[in-house]
Structures are given as C-alpha cells and as structure tokens.
Image (spheres, rainbow, N blue to C red):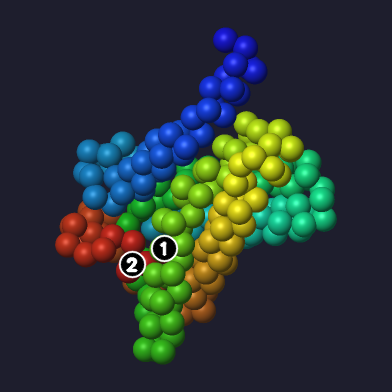
C-alpha cells in the first residue's frame, strides 16, 4: 500500500480515528488508576524514581508550552511549515509525557499537597481545571493533528475546520499544561507533600475521583 493511499484512507476516516485514539488514550490513563491487571504491567517504583519522573514530566511539559506557543505564533504570521513542525513536535512531546506518566502513576503512588488552606484550595482548583482541560483537549488535539497531517494547506484553510478546531485545541492544551506546571511547582517546591504508595493509592482511587488528590 502506497503512502498516498494510506494518507487518503486516514483523510477519509479522521473523525473515526480520532474517536478510536481518544478511547485508547482515556483507557490507558484510566487503567493505571483503576485496573489492577493493567497496573501490574508496570514495575514498582521508589519514591526517588517517582520524584525524578515528576521533575522530568514538568520539564517536558514546559518545553511543550514553548513549542505550542511558537506554533500559534507562526501560524498567525503565515509560517505554515514552521507551525506544522512545532505542533507535530508538541504532540511527540505529549507521547514522551505519557511514557513517563503512566509508569509513574501505576507503579509509583500519589503525592498529596500539604499547605495552608488558601494555598490548598487554590491548588485543588487549578488541579481540577488542569484535569478537566486535559480530558477535553484529547479529542480536539487529535482531530486537529489528523486533519493537519492528511490535508493540503488549501484544504485546511477552506474545506475542513482545522483552524477553528486548532484554536480550541491549542487554547485548552496550553492552559492545561501551564496549570499542570504551576501545580507541580506548588506540590514539589513551594509547599510540602505526603506520599502514598501505589497499592494504597489504588485502593483510595477506587473510592474517590482518581485524579483529584495529587499530581
């Protein structure tokens, strides 16, 4: 099968593929919180490894903020190829993020914020918005990416909603990443935290909203 025929197939099925990849993504993240069999695929991690992964994830997300911002700037200035490169790089960085995030959650446990009430409630609010935007951004980011990879520049400008979907995707994605980095700083550097091992955290997650307590 030629590259052009593959591209045509993907082009015709961008919506269906978006749904499929979204379900896979949601399933992978949900599995590391709630499915013991899926969690067992990942090794148990020490507290030191968990902290190292948290720092690496924050670094990757900070770089992603920069590449997304550049991609937005370049498309507003008509630099389509640079925009495409920046957005593709941003997506690759999110895959790198997932490669660290899934084992961190499955085998590493959860850190909980410890600080004064005003900071604690601000932290929870930012974390909740971060999580909500992360969930919402998955399908629109995937759809915008698939449209960008399978359509010509003329088609993207005139025939498909790439620009509109891309604005929504980039806005939600950027704000989610910024809030994620801010909550990371609050949890790991500004205030203190407690740590719950993966096995105990899993039991807690089965009773509570899995993503709300920590990051």
Please indicate, yes or no, whether residue 75 appears anywhere in the rendered image. Answer: yes
- Residue 89 horizontal side relative to residue 52, left or right: right
Name the outermost residue toward the front.
159
Q: Residue at x 46, y 66 (%)?
A: 130
Under circle 1, the secondary element is helix
Q: Rounded to the nearest whole Å, what is the CA distance between mark 1 and mark 2?
A: 8 Å
- Residue 159 horizontal side relative to residue 78, left or right: left
Which of pointers 1 and 2 lies earlier in the amino acid sequence?
1
Q: Residue at x 23, y 45 (%)?
A: 35
Query: Quick one: quadrant of the C terminus?
Result: bottom left
Q: Which residue is mark 2?
A: 212
The location of residue 32, given as percent across then percent down, is: 31, 47
The location of residue 210, given as percent across then percent down, is: 28, 60
Q: Nearer the viewer, residue 76 or 204?
A: 76
Q: Residue at x 74, y 37 (%)?
A: 154
Q: Are marks 1 and 2 in contact (CB under 8 Å)?
A: yes
Above or below residue 16? Residue 163 is: below
Q: Residues within 10 Å of mark 1 (few under 14, many from 20)?
A: some
Q: What numbered label is drawn on residue 131?
A: 1
Q: Nearer the viewer, residue 110 or 88?
A: 88
Residue 80: quarter of image: top right
Please indicate, yes or no, whether residue 91 appears anywhere in the rendered image. Answer: no
Residue 201: quarter of image: bottom left
Under circle 2, the secondary element is loop
């Amino acid at each position: 099968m030629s590259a052009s025929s593959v591209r045509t197939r993907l082009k015709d099925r961008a919506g269906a593929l978006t749904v499929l990849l979204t379900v896979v993504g949601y399933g992978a993240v949900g599995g590391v919180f709630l499915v013991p069999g899926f969690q067992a695929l990942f090794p148990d991690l020490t507290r030191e490894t968990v902290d190292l992964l948290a720092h690496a994830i924050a670094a990757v997300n900070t770089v992603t903020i920069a590449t997304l911002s550049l991609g937005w700037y370049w498309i507003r200035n008509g630099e389509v190829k640079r925009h495409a490169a920046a957005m593709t790089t941003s997506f690759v960085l999110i895959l790198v993020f997932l490669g660290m995030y899934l084992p961190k959650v499955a085998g590493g446990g959860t850190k909980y914020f410890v600080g004064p009430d005003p900071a604690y409630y601000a932290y929870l609010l930012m974390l909740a918005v971060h999580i909500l935007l992360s969930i919402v951004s998955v399908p629109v980011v995937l759809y915008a990416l698939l449209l960008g990879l399978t359509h010509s520049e003329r088609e993207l400008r005139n025939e498909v909603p790439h620009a509109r979907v891309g604005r929504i995707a980039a806005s939600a994605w950027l704000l989610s990443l910024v809030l994620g980095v801010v909550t990371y700083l609050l949890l790991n550097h500004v205030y203190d935290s407690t740590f719950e091992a993966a096995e105990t955290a899993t039991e807690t997650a089965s009773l509570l909203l899995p993503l709300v307590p920590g990051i």
